[in-house]
Image: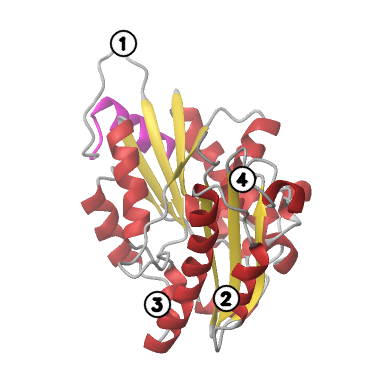
Amino acid sequence: MRALVAEAATGTGTGTGTAPAADAPVTVGFVPTMGALHDGHASLVRRARAENDVVVASIFVNPLQFGDPADLEHYPRTLEADLDLLGAAGADLAFAPEVQEMYPGYPDAPIVTVSAGRMGEVLEGASRPGHFDGVATVVAKLWNIVGPAAPVLRSYFGQKDAQQVAVLRRVARDLDVAVDVRSVPIVRSPEGLALSSRNTRLDAEGLERALVLSRALRLLADASAAGRPVDVEAARAMVRDEPGVELDHLVVVDPETLQELGPDTLGGPLRREALALVAAHVPPVRLIDNMVLPAAAG
């Protein structure tokens, strides 16, 4: 993998990227994915393509971040279609390792892993214990695989997984990983549903019900933009009242620390940007979404 990155950067490999000048630093844009790609992933690759000399994407269904074996088993695997999407979006290289390559000895867990700490124990982490430890471990490994061949490494993630972005920024900071973690805005359907690989498991009725998540977030974002109090309970009630949707959590947090904001902050105009996150079970899947709440003007 490192040799391929180096070859693509110098123009000697099969990559489609434009080789930089000999004295220019090589920038590598890296997009880690679990496959089952959609236009949200394509937007990450397009952003990386616009900002870097070489674009690398990985496709790896990481068993360490699945708490439910059935969820891992049913996760969609569409490698050929994924490769077509990556190529069309502008990726130079795709890295699709087998589980044994990433975790020798699997199904035994690796002895040394990365802990996401308290940031991985709240919100999604509370509902999916160990999930963010698995994410932190695999992404740290991938950065270590790609990074040494990249004088400048930028790694791209979708803002839909806002907690993941916050955790990985902290991993890079606390472990002194030379990577610039960048988030790309959520891609939504025309109706407002955040695009997700899990959406493919929803029927037409489920897709319609799932729209309540973005409606509830929009209620909060509109209130904050207008300088009104942010009524989290009203948004929660909106989700709970939707038939067939089971709310897990809907909270407003500090975007960097994930600390939940209380009535003293939300009871009047927001003085600083906040982040609203929601998770709910829409049979047969669990969906997440989030939206930035802008600070009140003035």
Q: Secondary structure at mark 2?
A: helix
Q: Is residue 61 among the parts visible in the rendering? A: no
Residue drawn at x 61%, y 38% as measured from the top left: 272
Q: Which mark is residue 269?
A: 4
Mark number displayed over residue 284: none
> Residue 238, which numbered label?
2
x, y percent for residue 106: 65, 63
Q: CA distance from mark 4 to mark 1?
A: 50 Å
Residue 111 in the figure: left or right of residue 59: right
**What range of the chain is rendered magenta?**
1-14
Of tags 3 and 2, the one toward the viewer is 2
Q: Are marks 2 and 1 in contact (CB under 8 Å)?
A: no
Upstream in sequence: badge 2 or badge 1? 1
User: Mark 1 or mark 3, which has the lower sequence index?
Assistant: 1
Query: Callout 4, which amino acid?
Result: Pro
Q: Main secondary structure of the magenta part?
A: helix
- Left or right for 27, reference 181: left
For residue 223, above or below residue 286: above
Identify the mark nearer the N-term, 3 or 2: 3
Marks 2, 1: nearer the viewer: 2
- What residue would you read off at disc 1? 23
Q: Are marks 3 and 4 in contact (CB under 8 Å)?
A: no
For residue 21, say whether it is visible: yes
Badge 1 amino acid: Asp
Pointer 3 residue: 200
**Viewer-proximal residue among 192 and 293:** 293
How would you rate the neighbour count of disc 4 (Cα within 10 Å): few for under 14, some for 14-19, many for 20 or more? many
Q: Report how far apart the C-alphas of labels 3 and 4 lie in the structure.
A: 38 Å
Alpha carbon separation for disc pair 1 and 3: 46 Å
Question: Foreground: 229 or 176?
Answer: 229
